[in-house]
Image (spheres, grey):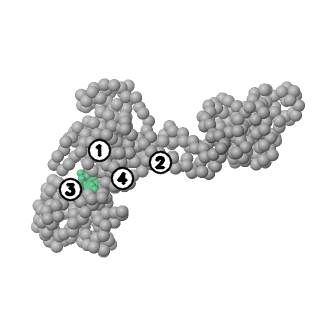
Amino acid sequence: MSSPDYPLTLDLAGRRVVVVGGGPVAARRTAGLVEAGAEVDLVAPFICEDLAELLSAGRVTWVEREFLTGDLTLKDRGASGADDPAQSRAEGVFEPAWLVHTATGDPLVDAQVASEAEAARIWCVRADAAQDSSAWTPAVARGAAGTASEGLTVAVSAGGDPRRATAVRDAVLAALDGGTLPVRRVRRVRRGALERDASDQGAPDQDATRPVGHVALVGGGPGADDLITVRGRALLAAADVIVTDRLGPRGLLSTVGADVEVIDVGKTPGNHPVSQTRINELLVQHARLGKRVVRLKGGDPFVLGRGGEEALHCVEHGVPVEVVPGVTSAVSVPAAAGIPVTHRGIAASFVVASAHEGAEHVLAAAADAAPDATLVLLMGITRLAETAAALVAAGRPADTPVALVERGWTPEQRTTTTTLAHAARDAVAAGVRAPAVVVVGQVVSLRERLGDLSGE
Ligand SMILES: C[S@@+](CC[C@H](N)C(=O)[O-])C[C@H]1O[C@@H](n2cnc3c(N)ncnc32)[C@H](O)[C@@H]1O
């Protein structure tokens, strides 16, 4: 059995590296070396456009000829070179390279370079034959600024199989940015600052020395773990603190690191254990400690979710805030039950309203809507009897189809279909409970043909 590789990261800044070859492979290698700060000497009779650009930018030097014995240890020998080591030494400066990359396209030349490198104890990467190299480069990617992988270098070696290494590298990077790998930066937080901040909510932060973190209001979608956006998922993976409640993809909370602080502000209808004021304060306090705070919300943060209030509170206190839209239950929960909120020939518009504040709000929302508009009511179960009666009194036909879709996109999803006239009675009989979306309109009848559409 052959010995395993020995992975190593090199600091090449200011160190001489020789690249032999002037084609695209040599250009790719050279670009990486230059980025790492190496002093690159190219040896090749011709160079491609990318290398010519690096040359004209003064990032590399070029020895414009074939490789000659001694090129790895002697610098500045000019175009003539010399076979006689004594003469070579006189022509150049003895400065062995730390590393050589050879990619000439000619196996004989590459083999010669490798053998001279071996004799001079210089690590040699051969583009043509990884198995005959003394060193080889892994597939490398660096996380982009602003992504979950920012600051990370992913390097994958696959025993000399570059395609496999590249595929695995890309998969790791995608998983990092997609948030399925819970990798985040650990920040240092000043002790005692939370207590100080608790009594300091009134004015914008005046202390420039304080670390200011960041708040992301992330729409988690209606409940399924995979209905959050890629951006939301990545922010969740990078979070130091997650402020969550009962709605949204709670299953994702089990994927975050053990040191991530998860604060459950668990709102249930009629029972708000943590007030909105306190939630706003929590966001600002933790951000002021320099933490990355994710406010994970069900559906979309700005659809009947009080996300606007949370964003305003952050802005008013000088805390950077962003919103990540989510898949709102207003559209996605009816869809899960096989009810499109619009359908050609049946309804060309829809109205979303909260039924929480009373029937007059629903009537006001529906008043200017088209007669065929679908009515989607959130928080509509507690006051369903009152709302349905008011809609009939306001002129909606008593036999208008109604769907009550509970816990959409969860394994407990259940749909009760009824009419405006019988909605209250049927809801009690079926034991319908929040969270549920109430759909009023002819589109409900499409469910008979479509059935549940939320997949497995
Ligand atoms: C405070 S509102 C939040 C709405 C959220 N911002 C959104 O865009 O979906 C809560 C209401 O959304 C509805 N809701 C949210 N998720 C739901 C789900 N998975 N199934 C059924 N209804 C849901 C219910 O009407 C619930 O009472």
Nearer-N-terminus badge (1/3): 1
Q: Position of residue 49 (x, y in %)?
A: 70, 47
- Residue type beneath disc 3: Ala
The disc at residue 434 is: 3
* Residue 211 quadrant: top left
Q: Position of residue 313 (x, y in %)?
A: 27, 39
Give the alpha-carbon distance from disc 1 to disc 2, as whole Å: 23 Å
- Residue type beneath disc 1: Thr
- Residue type beneath disc 4: Asp
Give the alpha-carbon distance from disc 3 to disc 2, as whole Å: 34 Å
Is any atom of residue 30 visible in this view?
A: no
- Mark 1 is surrounded, within 10 Å at the Cα level, by few (under 14), some (14 to 19) or many (20 or more) other residues, namely many
- Mark 4 is surrounded, within 10 Å at the Cα level, by few (under 14), some (14 to 19) or many (20 or more) other residues, namely some
What residue sits right under mark 2 in the picture? 175
The disc at residue 244 is: 1
* Mark 3 element type: loop
The disc at residue 121 is: none
- Residue type beneath disc 2: Ala
Q: Position of residue 120 (x, y in %)?
A: 77, 31
Give the alpha-carbon distance from disc 1 to disc 4, as whole Å: 14 Å
- In-image side of 11 versus 177 (left or right): right
